[in-house]
Each structure stands twice: as structure tokens, then as C-alpha cells.
Amino acid sequence: MSPAVPSRSQVVALYRQVLRNGQQFADYNFREYVQRIARQDFRSNAALSDPVQIASAWEKGVQDAAIVKRQSIINSLYSHGRSVLEKGKPALH
């Protein structure tokens, strides 16, 4: 049985979901890390042509998106304000 290969629109939607969930982090470093890793992972997987590898990368992406979402929720519960790099934004207190 051949694994289900996601369409281009599904991959783009997953990429956007990961970036959107990453934006929910209160901490600047976590937000930037999620964006950087998402870009790297999706760009490296763009060249895949084997359906088995594509399906495997898709499943990993779905799992990673769920992890980012859960961690951003947990992070928002324990935020301590803004980073020094975010001077223009008011601190959360």
C-alpha cells in the first residue's frame, strides 16, 4: 500500500500553522527558534521525491506542529515579560 502524499496546499497550510503557533510564544528567542527551524525543515524537505520519505516528513511535520502548539500554550502561562531585544513593546505584568 502506498503512503498518502499530501498536496502542496496541505504542506503550505501546515507550514503556516507552525509559524502561526510559533508566534504565540511570549519569549522572543522561542519565537525566532521555531521560525528558523520551520524554515530549515520545510526547505530541506522540498526536494524530496520518494512518496515514502514525503509521507514520513509529513507525519513528522504534523507532530512538530502539535508540539509547537502545546509548548506555546504552556509558555504563555509562564511568561515573565519581554526580552531586552524587544524594548519598544510594553512588558507584561
Image (cartoon, grey):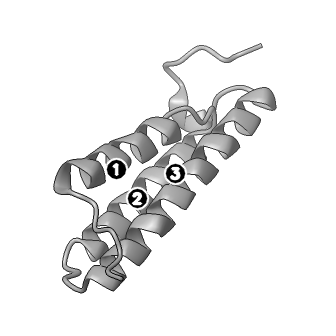
Is residue 21 toward the left or the right of residue 76 in the image?
Answer: left
- Nearer-N-terminus badge (3/1): 1
Mark nearest the camera among 3 and 2 is 3
Q: Which residue is mark 1?
A: 15
Q: Quadrant of residue 63?
A: bottom right
50 and 37: which one is in front? Answer: 50
Q: Which residue is mark 2?
A: 38
Q: Is residue 18 above or below residue 75?
A: below
Place of residue 6 in the rendered image (x, y in percent of width and height, measured from the top left): 28, 61
The answer to whether the residues at label 3 and label 2 have Cβ atoms under 8 Å apart is no
In the rendered structure, which amino acid carries the disc numbered 3?
A: Ala
Using the numbered discs, state the Cα–Cα distance from disc 2 to disc 1 in whole angstroms. Answer: 7 Å
Of helix, strand and loop, which one carries label 1? helix
16 and 83: which one is in front? Answer: 16
Q: Is residue 71 above or below residue 62?
A: above
The answer to whether the residues at label 2 and label 1 have Cβ atoms under 8 Å apart is yes
Q: Which residue is mark 3?
A: 65
